[in-house]
Amino acid sequence: MLLEKMLTNKSYVGIATHDDYLVKGAYNIVKKLKLNKNEYEFQMLYGVTEKLRDKINNDGHKIRVYVPYGENWYAYSVRRMQENPEIAGHITKSIFKFT
């Protein structure tokens, strides 16, 4: 797996995913390699899979949350949704979530 190779070679990796399966796989690699939590980070878009983001954070892993802003925020957001249409579903769910 590419992630394991990069981490084995001591590359600082931003594990950018909203997929629970991939996060679990990354957890397994981090544990296998006995990495310190300052040797990698997870990355997610704000408002997408917030429960997973909170779990990663609560598990003590470093996480960077991206928030689109500036003049081109809309174009960036549309491009990200075109790359992964599931993100649109996650955003829609978070907008209409009742707490």
Image (cartoon, rainbow, N blue to C red):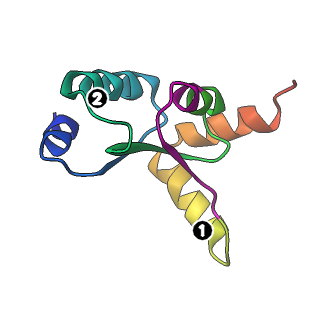
In the rendered structure, the answer to whether residue 96 lies left or right of residue 86 reads: right
Report the amino acid beneath label 2: Val
Circle 2 Cα neighbour tier, 10 Å, few/some/many (<14 / 14–19 / ≥20)? some
In the rendered structure, the answer to whether residue 28 lies left or right of residue 52 reads: left
**What's the residue at 62%, 30% (across, down)?**
54
Report the amino acid beneath label 1: Ala
Residue 63 picture location, percent across and down: 51, 43
Query: Is residue 70 one of those drawn in magenta?
Result: no
Mark nearer the N terminus (2 vs 1): 2
**Which of labels 2 and 1 is toward the front?**
2
**What's the residue at 19%, 28% (across, down)?**
33
Which one is in front, 10 or 96?
Answer: 10
Question: Element type at marker 1?
Answer: helix
Residue 10 picture location, percent across and down: 18, 47
Circle 1 Cα neighbour tier, 10 Å, few/some/many (<14 / 14–19 / ≥20)? few
Tags 2 and 1 touching, CB below 8 Å:
no
The stretch in magenta equals 55-68
Determine whether 10 is above or below 53 in the image.
below
Measure the alpha-carbon separation of dots 2 and 1.
Answer: 34 Å
Which part of the image, by quadrant, shows the C terminus? top right
Which one is in front, 5 or 97?
Answer: 5
Which residue is disc 2 drawn over?
A: 30
Determine whether 74 is above or below 64 in the image.
below
Residue 81 picture location, percent across and down: 55, 50
Q: Which mark is on residue 2?
A: none
Q: Which mark is on residue 75?
A: 1
**What's the residue at 87%, 25% (across, down)?**
98
Determine whether 58 is above or below 44 in the image.
above
